[in-house]
Image (tube, grey):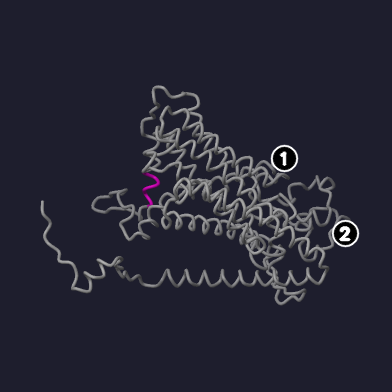
Amino acid sequence: MTLFQLVWAIIKIAIMVGFVVNTAAILTWFDRRGGAAIQDRVGPNRAVIKIGKFEIRLAGLLHPLADGLKFFTKEFFMPPKADKLLFRLAPILSMMPVMALVAVIPFGDALCTSDLHRSIDGSLLGAFPSVPRFGVCNAIAEHDVFGVDHAILGHVSAVLPVDLIIAPLSVGILYVFAMAGQGIVGAAIAGWSSDNKFSLMGALRAASQMVSYEVAMGLSLIGAMMIYGTVRLDEMVRWQGEHTWGIFAQPLGFILFYVAATAENKRIPFDLPEAESELVSGYFTEYSGMSFGMFYFAEYMEIITGAMLTTTIFLGGYELPFLHRDGFTVEFGGTQVWHQVMPHIWVTIFQIVAFFTKVLAMCWLHAIIRWSLPRFRYDQLMKLGWRVLLPLGLANVVVTGVVYCAIAQGGAGISDTFQVVAQSTQALIAFAITAGVVWLIVGFFKPRTKNPTIIGTAGKYAEATGGTPVTPMQA
């Protein structure tokens, strides 16, 4: 590894790990603030910085900081009969696989750090037929298309394209399955080593739940891999950029994957391993201080990595409608409607911003579900996994195979028709994004009005009869 590659590896790790850690902290705040808004109650407001007569609360944003200080300063307690090694090891085993998942998630296309027109011998330019459109660096970035041998360009390695992915492994999604499965180990060890019956019951629930829904999650991705023709996540994103987002190619697969990913995160409505009304805090009941904080933080980081995977596989990853390496190109059925050349650095910035914006939107959806749905019973949870999601996953694989073979046998006419349909979905996405941005801007500047809603027949009857009389409070 050269110094250039080492520096870029550190930069990519800092971007992905920094985003996951900081977003997880913000999600702890949004869970409180968003839940308060949904349930029409006061949210986080106790953490405050006092400067003379002034109090700074920042809409509750000081609470994540207070949480961190609390975790680091609280006493670490271990039950007398707990297994000391496994008890300390469990939080690490729960947190580290989540961090390892981000290694194979692409957050941008190949970044060209320099223009090779002035860096290599002119005789090499003939190897790149698309030089006028992309520049040599972009041509090398498409090495699978142009068959460029990087060995002949070793003397200019400092200007070769940089893949915006920490570890572009050829196994791709298989690595994700391997790392995601390690979360079961941490939960099981935590419950067993705590010498607590409630912790053990929570660990058994967590292990059975995660194993059950990993099967459905794997099946939900089989159809996507059949369509994309690869297990590499970066190649999946490129396919979606050239055709259509995975949510259109695999709508049932998207639903199955999202439900299974939510169950893997052990969040409401699937939080049976941590059901406080039944098991206190589940498999980490006996944990305190920063060891509890690692379990707590790992749960929020799982939300982010799950959102990253959903974005990458089904929502186009870093791709935007009609945005290519040379700029925006609107094309339908082989006819170019509009083309706008853009500098490569701006294309890369748009892609990175698009990826992280999609991830934040999926995290927001997780939080909305968290405060909107009731908890399943445990038998309902298991039946949903084995009797609903698993058969649907198998059916999705069969239907995908049949449709794929039919399209392949249909000839060029069928392929061209589906390409036009795919381009139409890109236009639909572009319209939805534009409308969403306008709605957010208008909603941000629109004055807020609070209209109290009375729910229930008793409240409606009292309102119809003149309201409920209010008497002075009695001591």
Image coords of residue 189 (percent x, y): 51, 31
**Residue 462 to residue 299: above or below:** below
Q: Is residue 269 magenta?
A: no
The region drawn magenta spans 61-66
Q: Secondary structure at mark 2?
A: helix
Amino acid at the residue labelled 1:
Thr
- Residue 228, given in percent of the width and then of the height, sits at 72, 56
- In the picture of the structure, the residue carrying the numbered disc 1 is 2
The x, y position of residue 236, in whole percent, is 69, 55
Q: CA distance from mark 2 to mark 1?
A: 28 Å
User: How many numbered tags mark residues here?
Assistant: 2
Q: Secondary structure at mark 1?
A: loop
Crowd around label 2: few <14 · some 14–19 · many ≥20 (10 Å): few
Q: Is residue 467 left or right of residue 427?
A: left
Horizontal and vertical percent position of residue 20:
53, 47
Chief SS of the magenta region: helix
Amino acid type of the residue tagged 2 in the rendering: Gly
Image disc number at residue 108: none
Residue placed under numbered mark 2 in the picture: 126
Which numbered disc flags the more N-terminal residue, 2 or 1?
1
Q: Is residue 434 left or right of residue 196?
A: right
Vertical placement of residue 243 versus 273, above or below: below
Q: Is residue 430 at all visible to an observer of this figure?
A: yes
- The answer, for residue 111, to whether it is visible in the render is no
Is the residue marked by circle 1 packed among few (<14), some (14-19), or many (20+) residues within 10 Å? few
